[in-house]
Amino acid sequence: VQLQAFGGGLVQAGGSLRLSCAASGRTFITYTMGWFRQAPGKEREFVTYVRWKGGITAYADSVRGRFTISGDNAKNTVYLQMNNLKPEDTAVYYCAATGRNWNSGSYYRSYAYHYWGQGTLVTVSS
């Protein structure tokens, strides 16, 4: 599975962006897809994931209520709609995927994901 993330850019605080992650190689319907981010000088952190079977989603506390993960099966693409962006959301955003069934808590961790996109930079100005 190859993942390509795009849609990042520069936005003012309070603005919105939508990131996309296109999957190729295999259908992603059986996968769990996630988004992580890494700010300068910080470790990569979990943002959100979706498990397509059952439609289960989860969000980091810092983005819950502002970010929404969704997908388009026909386009093999997952989206991250980011609203009310804050300067602390500035980071490189990575999409990730896995076909393995983990316990639910593992999907918050980088190790649970076997496939990663190249990252797209989101910069939020104050």
Image (cartoon, helix red, strand yellow):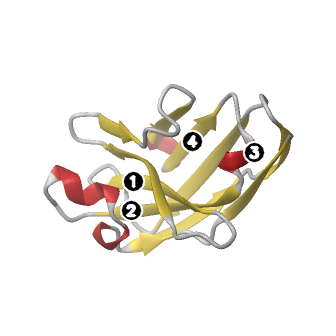
Does residue 68 lie above or below 125 as drawn? above
* Amino acid identity at mark 2: Ala
Q: Is residue 123 left or right of residue 2?
A: right
Residue at the image point whose x is 56% and y is 56% from the top? 22
> Residue under circle 1?
33
Sequence-wise, the earlier of marks 3 and 4 is 4
Where 107 sits versus 19, above or below?
below
Q: Give the number of the disc on residue 80.
A: 4
Which type of secondary structure does the marked residue at label 2 adopt? Answer: strand
Q: Quadrant of the C terminus?
A: top right
Check disc 3 and report its element: helix, strand or loop. helix
Whole-percent x, y for residue 78 in the image? 51, 46
53 left or right, relative to 87? left
Question: Looking at the image, do the residues carrying marks 2 and 3 touch, with CB atoms under 8 Å apart?
Answer: no
| 87 or 121, nearer to the observer | 87
Which of the 4 image quarters holds residue 85? top right
Looking at the rendered structure, the kind of residue marked 4 is Leu
Q: Amino acid at mark 3?
A: Pro
Between discs 2 and 4, the one toward the N terminus? 4
Secondary structure at numbered mark 4: strand
The image's mark for residue 87 is: 3
Give the residue at x 62% y 49%. Answer: 20
